[in-house]
Image (cartoon, rainbow, N blue to C red):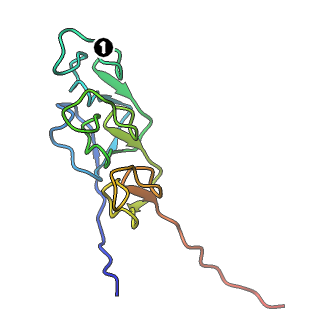
Amino acid sequence: MKEITVMEWKTSDFKGGRTRMGRKAGEILEGDNFPCSLCSGKGILPRSKDTKCPVCRGDGMVSLTGPVVVCAYCKGRGEYPPRTNITCSVCRGKGLVSITKPIEACAHCRGTGAEPGNKLPCLKCKGKGVVTKKESKTGSVKNG
């Protein structure tokens, strides 16, 4: 028999700060403007000299329509593979992806965002690690 893990989703308002600090995978964030994950909100790519960030275009902030969750595929770094300046194909370097509430962990990839058995983004959740929860409609059926 398959064991089902129940995850509790917590909503929080984004107050700023470093992109990779204080964020947990699966945490729902509210807001519209967030620090760029690829450049850590600095506007300049890490491990380069004065190269403007292609994600935020040197601004240090990215805009997303909320609610959003941390990208499960790149773990909010904005780059995949880690320690490269190659942007994540799921979040496009932002480190966050927009969602539609209510959500639950993807049963196919178990919330990792990666396809089981290889390193490609999950086909069911598209690398987000979460899927929109299907609401069951319970209604009475009238005979006659």
| Amino acid type indicated by mark 1 | Gly
Q: Which residue is mark 1?
A: 58
Q: How many marks?
A: 1
Residue 119 image point, x, y percent: 33, 51
How many residues crowd around disc 1 within 10 Å: few (fewer than 14), some, or many (20 or more)? some
- The answer, for residue 102, to whether it is visible in the render is no
Q: Which residue: 25% across, 16% down?
A: 43
Q: Which SS class for mark 1?
A: loop
Residue at the right extreme? 144
Q: Quadrant of residue 4?
A: bottom left
Closer to the camera in the image, 58 or 113: 113
Closer to the camera in the image, 70 or 122: 122
Query: Does 100 appear above or below 63?
Result: below
For the N terminus, give its image quadrant.
bottom left
Q: Quadrant of residue 36?
A: top left
For the C terminus, give its image quadrant.
bottom right
Residue 82 image point, x, y percent: 21, 38
Query: Does 78 appear above or below 69?
Result: above
- Relative placement, left or right, of 16 versus 115 is left
Query: Does 47 appear above or below 121?
Result: above
- Relative placement, left or right, of 87 versus 131 is left
Closer to the camera in the image, 64 or 73: 73
Q: Quadrant of residue 104?
A: bottom left
Residue 22 image point, x, y percent: 16, 42
Q: Which residue: 21% across, 27% down?
A: 40
Residue at the bottom extreme? 143
